[in-house]
Image (cartoon, helix red, strand yellow):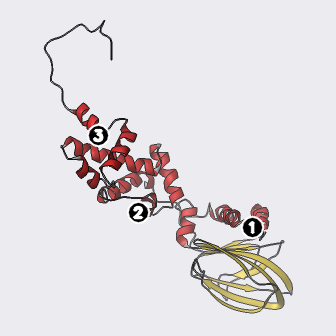
Amino acid sequence: AMGFHPKMYVTVSGFHPLEDLHSLVVGDMAIDLWHVECTAAAHGRYVSIHPRIFVMLDGGRLNLAPSRSGPLRSCAGCYVPAGAELWSCLTGSQTLRHIDIHMTRARMKTLLDGGAPPSKPIFFENLSAIEEIAKLLSDKSKPSAVRVRLAECIVLELLGEAAAPRPEGRNKDLLASLRSFVQNNMARRINVDELATAVDLSRTKLNSEVRELTGASPYQWLLEQKIDHAKVLLRKGRRFAEIARLTGFSDQAHFNRVFKAATGIAPGRWTIEQAPRPVSSNVQDRSNTPLL
């Protein structure tokens, strides 16, 4: 099947699934719901190529450690960076339900507002802040979009403050980077997804940042850049068909429509109005002259 596949290297003993794994995969995120029976000496080692968050359900706890010889901690959940080891060990038989939230590091970074995910494991002794969210997330009858949003809420709640801050000056440099990309690709059609990729942001995050900086959507801002460039070419006397080609519009008619929608007048009329007017020495009193 196509889609995101979180790869994990697992060595376990004493864990026996009570039902089939329920896995929801949407984009670059996977949500796994486990229900297992554990023997008294159950233990395991886990390594994933993607960062993940492990959340116990129903008040369950598990002894966890970042290495085989590391100190065990009784935890309600944990965050595990990509490539980091996680070891588990039980001291008594029990039945456990838990959720694993896997996602790519890029997705997690975007979700954390550009901050880098923590580089070391984080062990949570108490998950009361997300208990209700986790309970809703474990409801397999809920729509996929709802469960994805709930999983994102858990990531934000648990890692929001621990994420490394974004580099300073990001907003100041964002528009400069976008302008450079548009100028280098002015002669072709550009979509908003390309703008987002060019500055390493999600489409949603790009929209919020560009609106904050300019008051316009990314698409509106993009058209403004193209229209501004078209005005420069109009002042140079370039033909309309050539300007349409150099600014990435499909044809002259398309350029005319977009230009008029953006400026309120057609390109030809705009060019006439921009032309310098001769200064007349014949001064008249216009106080009683109707304005047409």
Q: Is residue 119 visible?
A: yes
Residue 206, x across and y down, in percent: 49, 55
Residue, disc 2: 198
Residue, disc 3: 267
The CA distance from mark 1 to mark 3 is 55 Å
Judged from the image, the secondary structure of the residue bearing numbered disc 1 is: helix
Who's the residue at 77% across and 71% down the image? 140
Residue 290, x across and y down, in percent: 32, 11
Cβ atoms under marks 1 and 3 closer than 8 Å: no
Judged from the image, the secondary structure of the residue bearing numbered disc 2 is: helix
Residue, disc 1: 137
Who's the residue at 33% across and 53% down the image? 249
Question: What amino acid type should be assigned to the residue bearing mark 2?
Answer: Ala
Q: Nearer the viewer, residue 150 or 20?
A: 20
Which mark is in front, 2 or 3? 3
Question: What amino acid type should be assigned to the residue bearing mark 3?
Answer: Pro
Q: Does 72 sit left or right of 255 as displayed?
A: right
Q: Quadrant of the C terminus?
A: top left
Residue 165, x across and y down, in percent: 52, 60
Q: Nearer the viewer, residue 285 or 156?
A: 285
Q: Does 78 sit left or right of 81 as displayed?
A: right
The CA distance from mark 2 to mark 1 is 33 Å
Q: Is residue 121 visible?
A: no
Res 15 → quadrant: bottom right
Q: Which residue is the extreme one toward the front?
A: 253
Q: Nearer the viewer, residue 28 or 161?
A: 28
Which mark is in front, 1 or 3? 3
